[in-house]
Image: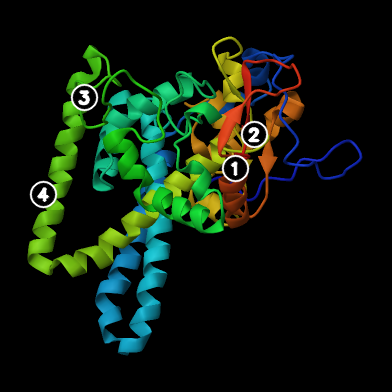
Amino acid sequence: MGAGGRMPVPSNKNGEKENPLHRVPHEKPPFTLGQIKKAIPPHCFQRSLLRSFSYVVYDLCLASIFYYVATSYFHLLPYSLSYIAWPIYWVFQGCVLTGVWVIAHECGHHAFSDYQWVDDTVGLILHSALLVPYFSWKYSHRRHHSNTGSMERDEVFVPKPKSRMAWYSKYLNNPPGRVLTLAVTLTLGWPLYLAFNVSGRDYDRFACHYDPYGPIYSNRERLQIYISDAGLFAATYVLYSVAAAKGLAWLVCVYGVPLLIVNGFLVLITFLQHTHPALPHYDSSEWDWLKGALATVDRDYGVLNKVFHNITDTHVAHHLFSTMPHYNAMEATKAIKPILGKYYQFDDTPVVKAMWREAKECLYVEPDEDGGSKGVFWYRNKF
């Protein structure tokens, strides 16, 4: 699955591995987006309807096989072995369905095919099946890509300055507090973001992805928000019917727990892509689109890079060229790294270790105190 294996670890001219915690430059890059694009083979921007659908079919076939094995054979196992079999199913199914979620995300970027109606139809079906409001998230996510790294206008995992941290934050700045924070973030973070815009940008009134008249959306987008909500209602009705026929416990085991794993992965992936001690954030005096797009980091999830269609280890290229299909992103990343140089950030720290480090080190942002630019913000953790 996906388009390749692990990313090579960046090294300096002496062949030594670079320190992933070394700050990314925040000055205006000495290259343009056009120069970056010229370094990428033209075929990387070509979208193949047949190839894109092949990933959908492959993922859904895997998900169907896991479902068939679980529902056909697990009840035949000795009772004690079922406590091993079901968690294995949950993890495998959750990982594969995260790949399905990524493909729907590609549809939202018009990276699936050359036909917008195909992308929106496939994306609406796949995301609704995973209880995601397709058009609602498509538009807020597009604004994230348009404003990445901006303290005022970015849409997701927007850090706060120290002065705006909640009063209880310092009491969570310890191992038990970090465990609690990560647990809540990975289990409830996604629904809280959709319903209450938690971790999103500040609006002058209540913001919700299900509200067609919320401040996130423009007047011309309202109808499609209604369509997203209709897709969720349809998916919810199907799930209700299944629960009525099979029982709620059956539905939770077969669908509910894998969905929680999907939600946890997509929050973790997004968190680690945009939260890193080496990454800057900018206020309006310093921000521009290219600097913001480069304020992201590629991560290494091992074999899951392929399962997640390389959204994990080609995220920098994705922010630069979001309509590029995922199966060409590895080749594109390799091509642009010599151009980006120190502006390219890759961190192969094991995911669990990185998650804990970022939860510990990246609590709020402040400008440097040494008289540097006051519009460039870096992560801090001292209260």
Give residue 333's mark.
2
Give residue 185's mark.
none
Q: Residue at x 20, y 64 (%)?
A: 251
Q: CA distance from mark 3 to mark 4?
A: 20 Å
Q: Position of residue 209 (x, y in %)?
A: 27, 31
The residue indicated by pointer 3 is 224
User: Dividing the picture into quarters, in which one does residue 242 lie?
Assistant: bottom left
Q: How is the image coloured?
A: rainbow
Q: Provide the secondary structure element on which disc 3 rests.
A: helix
Mark 4 surroundings within 10 Å by alpha-carbon count, few (fewer than 14), some (14 through 19), many (20 or more) = few
Q: Earlier in the sequence, mark 3 or mark 4?
A: 3
In the rendered structure, the answer to whether residue 35 lies left or right of residue 154 reads right
Q: Earlier in the sequence, mark 1 or mark 2?
A: 1
Badge nearest the viewer, 4 or 2 = 4
Q: Earlier in the sequence, mark 4 or mark 1?
A: 4
The residue indicated by pointer 1 is 313
Q: Earlier in the sequence, mark 4 or mark 2?
A: 4
Q: Given the image, on which type of amino acid does mark 3 rest?
A: Gln
Q: CA distance from mark 4 to mark 2?
A: 42 Å
CB atoms of marks 1 and 2 within 8 Å:
yes
Residue nearer the viewer, 25 or 38: 25
Q: CA distance from mark 1 to mark 2?
A: 9 Å
Q: Earlier in the sequence, mark 3 or mark 2?
A: 3
Residue nearer the viewer, 238 or 53: 238
Q: Residue at x 34, y 59 (%)?
A: 258
The residue indicated by pointer 4 is 237
Q: CA distance from mark 4 to mark 1?
A: 36 Å
